[in-house]
Image (cartoon, rainbow, N blue to C red):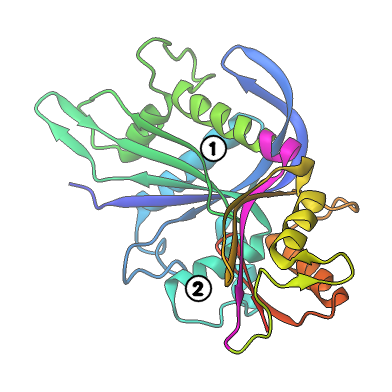
Amino acid sequence: MKKLLPLIVLAAILNRTTVFAQTAEVKTVQPKIIVIPFTKENEDIRTVLESDVNRRVAISKVKEEFDNRGFTTVDFTAKLKSAIDDGIFTSGSQTDIKSALVEYSGADIYVEVEVPEMISTASGNAARIILQAFDVSTANSLANKVCESPKFHTTDYGALVTRALSKNENLPVKDGKVSPCVVDFLNVMQTKFDDIVANGRSIKVNFSLAQGSKYKFSTELKPDGLPFSDVLENWMAENAVKNNYHIQGVTDVKVFFDDVRIPLKDEKDMNYSPNKFGLKIYQFLKSKNINCSRQVKNGTIFITIN
């Protein structure tokens, strides 16, 4: 049996190009993709590929599938070496190392590609691949797909991975030109990504009060005399993409927006992160002479009013 072999695919930087979706050719906005290994507990993303040829094969095959469909990809090994040379890894935590690498890559999307151990039966061996796409900034799910190869009497893991990506019971693969399973996944991912381009990405904004704060969210603010919570909601309506936001709850001590759409790019066509939106909130509150602190984690902005 082969070892459990999960991977991660990260995606970033927009590009205009042609994508082939089965037999149709369409023009669309698409992400650049980098394929990196997902690590289990006690595995180090910086060294995990060194002694595992199967992981290297799987990464190469998945990257090749994206390349074949017109996506521009980034080489993981080269990017990792560059990150190490630039000293971006300041923590020993594997979660922090992964986060640092994602941030360093400038990614918009990551796709988790998990390949469990080989399926062995009397009728042959097979590979199963689980694909899941996420928005890097928010960890919101964009797409998921399970691909499984037909069974063959072979132990060539790379061949089974390729078959898994290409397999579709209702649409036979001809001459290796189309990989229906991975195309189905990419089509869904592309649709969700196009929605982000058009309507913004979804984040959360959590307003709370510091201990001893002189404010409550029912406090009326000058010059309009509106409650603090209404001032925040009016600002959110003006600054969310297409007025697209949802406020989950308001109390005297907390205001929580569970779905606020922010732009993917700013007016200079630079990546627009939740941290930039958090800075905009910070500057707005400062203009009201309201002191606050802010933190951004996993697509949620935490604003604490002093």
Q: Is residue 305 above or below residue 188?
A: below
Image position, residue 263 (x, y; %): 76, 48
Q: Residue at x 86, y 72 (%)?
A: 222
Q: Is residue 265 visible?
A: no
Q: Specify the amino acid type for callout 2.
A: Asp
Nearest to the observer: residue 199 or residue 64: 199
Q: Residue at x 56, y 83 (%)?
A: 90
Q: Please tell me whether mark 2 or mark 1 is closer to you in this view.
A: 2
Residue 129 located left or right of residue 301: left
Nearest to the observer: residue 223 or residue 114: 223
Image position, residue 187 (x, y; %): 57, 27
Q: Is residue 235 visible?
A: yes
Q: Is residue 150 above or below residue 225?
A: above
Q: Specify the amino acid type for callout 1.
A: Glu
Nearest to the observer: residue 76 or residue 191: 191
* Mark 2 residue element: helix
The numbered mark at residue 29 is: none
**Quarter that holds the C terminus:** bottom right
Q: Is residue 54 above or below residue 20?
A: below
Image position, residue 156 (x, y; %): 29, 37
Residue reaching furthest to the left = 122
Nearest to the observer: residue 203 or residue 118: 203
**Span highlighted in magenta in the image:** 195-211
Q: Label 2: few (<14), some or many (≥20) within 10 Å?
A: few
The numbered mark at residue 64 is: 1
Q: Give the residue pinned by disc 2.
A: 96
Q: Residue at x 78, y 54 (%)?
A: 234
Residue 206 counted in the magenta span:
yes
